[in-house]
Image (cartoon, helix red, strand yellow):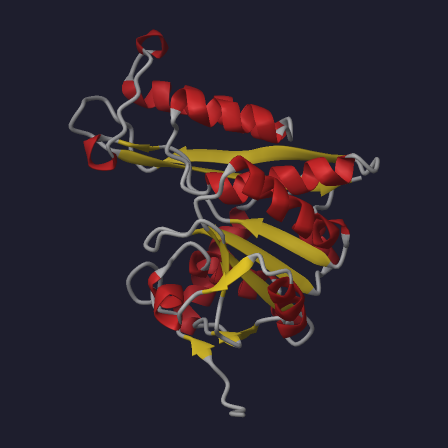
Amino acid sequence: MSNRVVCREASHAGSWYSASGSQLNAQLEGWLSQAQSTIRPARAIIAPRRVFILGPSHHVPLSRCALSPADVYRTPLYDLRIDQKVYADLWKTGLFERMSLQTDEDEHSIEMHLPYTAKAMESHKDEFSIVPVLVGALSESKEQEYGKLLSKYLADPSNLFIISSDFCHWGQRFRYTYYDESQGEIYRSIEHLDRMGMGIIEQLDPMSFTNYLKKYRNTICGRHPIGVLLNAVAELRKSGLEMNFSFLNYAQSSQCRNWQDSSVSYAAGALIVH
């Protein structure tokens, strides 16, 4: 057997974000210094030993979830090690596919969180590992199945979960132009639609979120990773574990005012375990 370490390159560095470690470090320090603290410490503050990163598949059709063939994920800051023990346990369930290294490097949804993760954890960089999971276009029953499976990891305070998602992708190039005239300008309609979904996510009710998506078809790219998280929370709440989710920030890439415009929405929130 080969002992060669398989590395996933930081394939979007230099295009989606800086490939320079020093420049990226300075940018991250600047952005993080502007971030407002939450009222209570989120689980990220407890120096997690494992960081699960669930991201949607944008390029490859998947009906299940997939694991990376890599041992290490490279970033311009430092390399992140995949937790092979957790990977082995997940693989044994028979619920996961193995994506190719090419598929892994083509996908951006997980990679975009790696620089932030590396920066936030730099004082513990030899003490933690990552568990990247590519989430396919799951059915409701599959979201429940993966949520139940991952709930034991979510319950463990030494683990942190990152869910990768944008919110509404609006415009003809996204083939989505929902507009509620009662909200005024198009961008206000988009925000109203997004905040409706955000409010439902804060309720931590997976069925309500599913119904919202069926009704409005909002183009939330990480809807399935979000669905997995909501189902994991629902599983833990059955045993009396108290949690609440709060959105902390919301933004749009541009303000749409006519049908030729387009925008992508972004929202960030935190799950607090009591």
Going 47% across and 33% down the picture, which residue do you hit?
250
- Residue 158 image offset from top left, x and y in percent: 75, 59
Q: Residue furthest left?
A: 260
Occupied quadrant, residue 48: bottom right
Q: Up-down: is 128 above or below 134?
A: below
Q: Residue furthest front?
A: 94
Say which quadrant the N terminus sits in.
bottom right
Q: Residue furthest top?
A: 182
Going 40% across and 65% down the picture, which residue do you hit?
104
Going 76% across and 49% down the picture, which residue do you hit?
155
Q: Up-down: is 139 above or below 17?
A: above
In this view, the residue in front, 95 or 163, is: 95
Q: Up-down: is 255 above or below 97?
A: above
Going 67% across and 51% down the picture, which residue do you hit?
149
Q: In this view, does 37 lie to the left or right of 157?
A: left
Q: Is residue 134 left or right of residue 253?
A: right
- Residue 203 image offset from top left, x and y in percent: 64, 26
- Residue 118 image offset from top left, x and y in percent: 55, 66
Say which quadrant the C terminus sits in.
top right
- Residue 58 image offset from top left, x and y in percent: 35, 51
Q: From where the camera sits, is residue 36 visible?
A: no
Q: From where the camera sits, is residue 48 visible?
A: yes
Q: Up-down: is 119 above or below 181?
A: below
